Image (tube, rainbow, N blue to C red):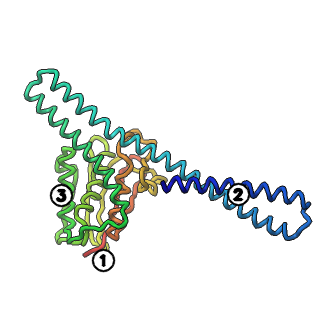
Amino acid sequence: MRRRKATFFFLVLGICLIAIAVALNIGWILLNLREVVLLVFGIIFFAVIITGLILNTIFLVREIRRNEQHDAFLNAVTHELKTPIASIKLYLETLKTRDVAEEKRHEFYDIMIDDSNRLLDTVEQVLQASRTREKNRRLNTSEIDLGKLINECVKIIQTRYKLDDATVKFTEPAEPLVISGDASELQIAFTNLLDNAVKYSKDEPKITIKIRNSNETHIEIFFKDTGVGIAPNEIKRIFKRFYRVPGIPTIENKGSGLGLPIVKSIIKKHGGRIRAESKGEGKGSLFIVQLRKR
């Protein structure tokens, strides 16, 4: 509703500015440029009209881009929902219409459970994106041992993708690094970062996680992977809602464009910051999260 009102406002503004421009031109011709006052007001109004038209054009271009991103988001979410649903339906129909060996039956069950989890993850991500936009939503704050929390996130990803221990390298710090925050929210943020590191890697992902004291007041967490990497001109855009890096075949149709915006929103609510670094496509990525100490 807000977007429609804003679009309508700028559309009316553009029409009014054009009407004023036409009226001024006609008045200018009728008076034959004899009035100095009209000349001054004409220059002022002309500047106002040009400024308004520029702002109107910028707004319309942004709306077009936003609509394109929304369309891409809908296509991505549709794909993320349709694929596992179609898979589950196929296996269920197979189990219903054919006699399947017990071993094969259990294999089908495992596949359907994985697809169901994929569906739940997609739905949860959309719901989480909605929750992060609630400005009045309060965090369930408690003291958190970052080392233990990240260990839990690593185990979640290893279970989800059936990864061995060598895939994700993380050594807990010698001394507990404690912060004050919402453990469930931070778990979502860290899990999203690890999930992206796996999805946007090739056949054998390699992920390294390190924690260190940045200074007396902050802790830094480094998530490094050997995946597809990020082009320099895309780094600032990847944290925007619905944005998906174009032109990389290995990541087409993966993700909804909500993961990193969710991560940024959660980290920001905790008074922290996140930034990304990459040497380019095919050279991996590094995400650095900075959080305040307890």
Q: Nearer the viewer, mark 3 or mark 1?
A: 3
Q: Nearer the viewer, residue 134 or 80?
A: 134
Circles 3, 1 touching at the beta carbon (< 8 Å): no
Local crowd size for mark 3, using a 10 Å CA cut-off: few (<14), some (14–19), many (≥20):
some
Q: Nearer the viewer, residue 184 or 292?
A: 184
Work out whether mark 2 precedes mark 3 in sequence or the reverse, and give the earlier one: 2
Between the C-alphas of marks 1 and 2, the distance is 53 Å
Residue at 22% from the left image edge and 44% from the top image edge: 117
Residue at 29% from the left image edge and 54% from the top image edge: 192
Q: Which residue is mark 2?
A: 17
Q: Say left or right for 169 vs 36.
A: left
Q: Amino acid at mark 1?
A: Thr
Local crowd size for mark 2, using a 10 Å CA cut-off: few (<14), some (14–19), many (≥20):
many
Tell which residue pokes out farthest to the bottom in this image: 216
Does 89 sit above or below residue 17? above
Residue at 29% from the left image edge and 64% from the top image edge: 221
Between the C-alphas of marks 2 and 3, the distance is 59 Å
Q: x, y (%) of residue 125?
A: 31, 51
Q: Amino acid at mark 2?
A: Leu
Instruction: Tell me if residue 234 can be seen.
Output: yes
Q: Which residue is mark 1?
A: 217
